Amino acid sequence: MEINCWGDSMAEGYFWGDDVSYPSVLEELTGIATNNFGIRSEDSVEILTRSLEYGDQSGDVMIIQMGDNGGWKDMEELIEQHRTMLREGGADKYIIVSSTDDPNDFQQIWGYTTEPVGLEDTWYEAALREAFGEHLFVARKYLVEKGLEVTRLTETEEDRERAEAGLISLQFREPELDNTHLNAAGYTAMAHGIYELGQQLGYWK
């Protein structure tokens, strides 16, 4: 069994990860060979196409995070793209990772402002949860609720204020440079959350 992580730059660990990606940390946590199939700037259609070309993934764990770069007109289409990847790959073990910010908001306003989002499911998280249930990893919520703890970072007053609004700590980003991607601490926290969900699903011990 291998772990196949499909996605764009968020899987690749691009920008401020300092060569840390969630797939690389996940491999350390699980001890299972983990393939990083993230390519920066790819839209959901391109990620889907690569997965189909890769072929049989039965017996492997598929982890999919896509949609921030477009390639879909509505959530129904994006969800069907996920389902096609799972069906054609033959994967019955899988985790769907939600975006860390609103995929329809090209200004990524949640990174730039303190506009409250809350800890209830957003519109797109709710759609993914309805489609994939217990297989959904809500990255934003995990980073807000447990990210600082698992990375052993000290919580600041700003972190507490952002958490109350459902916003990711700026300790997990490089906000002066970019407000979409994570830094090494952010990708590490994300890997821990995916690892915990995989344990709950029985994919690894």
Image: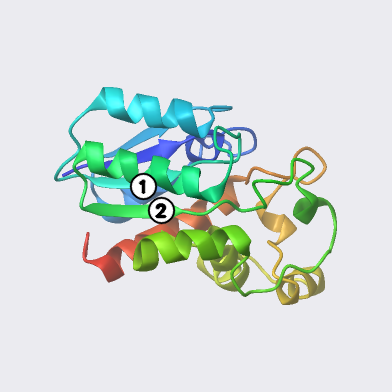
Residue 184, relative to residue 69: is it above or below?
Answer: below
* Image coordinates for residue 119, horizontal then vertical, percent: 64, 74
Q: Determine the CA span between mark 1 and mark 2.
A: 6 Å
Q: Residues within 10 Å of mark 1 (few under 14, many from 20)?
A: many
Residue 123, relative to residue 155: is it above or below?
Answer: above
Q: Amino acid at mark 1?
A: Ile
Mark sitting on residue 96? 2
Q: Quadrant of the C terminus?
A: bottom left
Residue 186, relative to residue 86: is it above or below?
Answer: below
* Image coordinates for residue 116, horizontal then vertical, percent: 79, 69
Q: Is residue 64 left or right of residue 94?
A: right
Name the residue at 21% across, 66% down: 202
User: Is residue 64 in view?
Assistant: yes
Q: Is residue 17 left or right of residue 188?
A: right
Sequence-wise, which precedes: disc 1 or disc 2? 1
When asked about the image quadrant of residue 90, the answer is top left
Label 1–label 2 contact, CB within 8 A: yes
Mark sitting on residue 153? none
* Image coordinates for residue 26, horizontal then vertical, percent: 37, 50
Name the residue at 22% across, 59% down: 203
Name the residue at 29% across, 70% down: 200
Q: Is residue 51 left or right of residue 108?
A: left
Residue topped by disc 1:
63
Q: Secondary structure at mark 2?
A: strand
Q: Residues within 10 Å of mark 2 (few under 14, many from 20)?
A: many
User: Is residue 196 in view?
Assistant: no
* Image coordinates for residue 31, horizontal then vertical, percent: 24, 50
Instruction: Report the residue that reaches farthest toward the top.
Output: 53
